[in-house]
Image (cartoon, grey):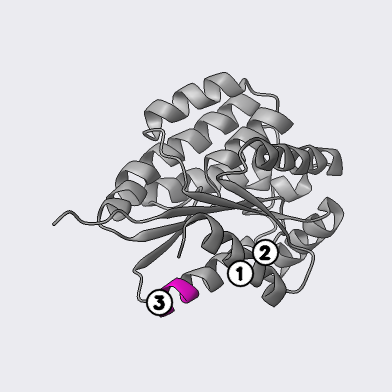
Amino acid sequence: MTLKRGKFITFEGVEGGGKSTQIQRLADWFREQGREVLVTKQPGGTAIGSQIRQTLLHVDHAHMEPWCEALLYLADRAQHVRQVIEPHLSRGVWVLCDRYQDSTVVYQGVARQVDSGLIDAIYQQAALGLKPDLTIILDLDVTTGVARARSRNVELQLSQAEGRFEEEDLSFHRAVREGFIQLAAREPHRVRLVDATEDAEHVFQLVRDACEAVVHV
C-alpha cells in the first residue's frame, strides 16, 4: 500500500499579520482530526537555517545587498526542503510553514527588485521546485502590521536580533503588500488572500474556509 503524501500549506503576508498565531491554530485543528502535523518556518527550520536566520534578520546587517539577501533565503530553503519538508511530506505528514518561496518572490523580487527569473531558476534546483498545495496570505494595512511587529519584538526582546525588516520604510512594506496581492490574483487556485484586520478567531474561520476549499480537509 502506497503511503498518501502529506499536504504542504504555507503562510505569507506583511509583517505583523499574525502568521504565528494562525499557523498554530490550524495545526491544532488538524491534530484534532487525527492528522500528523509539522509546524516549521523559514528562515530557521534547520540548525543551519537558524544560523542563516541570525544573519538575515539582525539589525546590524541593514546594508545587506539585495542579491546576498535573496541567496541566503534560497540557501536556507534548499536545506529546509531537502532535510525537513520533503521527507515529512513523503511520510504523510502535513507540513505548515511560516513563510516560503513566495516571500522571496515578493520581498526580494518585487520590493528589492532582484531578477525574479533568476530567483525562480535557483529555487527550482535548490529546493526541488516544491510548491505548496495552499498558500494563505494574511493581509492588513502595513502601518498597523509594522506597529504590531515592532511591539512584538520589544515584548520578546527581539528588536536587535530579528528586527531588520521592521525597520524598513513604510514604502518598502507597501511594495511587499502589493506584491502579495498581485500574487493572489495571479494564482487563485493555490493562493488565498485573508483579511487579517479582524480578531484572531474570525481570521481563523477564514483560514479554515480556505483550507476546506483548496485542500479538502
Q: CA distance from mark 3 to mark 2?
A: 23 Å
First in sequence, mark 3 or 1: give its number: 1
Identify the residue at horizontal 66%, vertical 66% (top origin): 206
Q: Residue 18 shows which numbered tag?
A: 2
Q: Looking at the picture, which amino acid does disc 3 mark? A: Gln
Q: CA distance from mark 3 to mark 1?
A: 19 Å
Looking at the picture, tell me which residue is in the foreground, 99 or 29: 29
Q: CA distance from mark 1 to mark 2?
A: 5 Å
- The answer to whether mark 1 and mark 2 are in CB contact below 8 A is yes
Q: Residue 33 shows which numbered tag?
A: 3
Q: Main secondary structure of the magenta part?
A: helix
Q: Nearer the viewer, mark 3 or mark 1?
A: 3
Q: 109 left or right of 87?
A: right
Dot 1, crowdedness within 10 Å: few (<14), some or many (≥20)?
few
Identify the residue at horizontal 49%, vertical 54% (top origin): 9
Magenta extent: 28-33
**Occupied quadrant, residue 11:** bottom right
Q: Residue 161 shows which numbered tag?
A: none
Dot 3, crowdedness within 10 Å: few (<14), some or many (≥20)?
few
Dot 2, crowdedness within 10 Å: few (<14), some or many (≥20)?
many
Secondary element type, mark 1: helix
Q: 56 left or right of 97?
A: right
Above or below residue 160? Residue 112 is: above
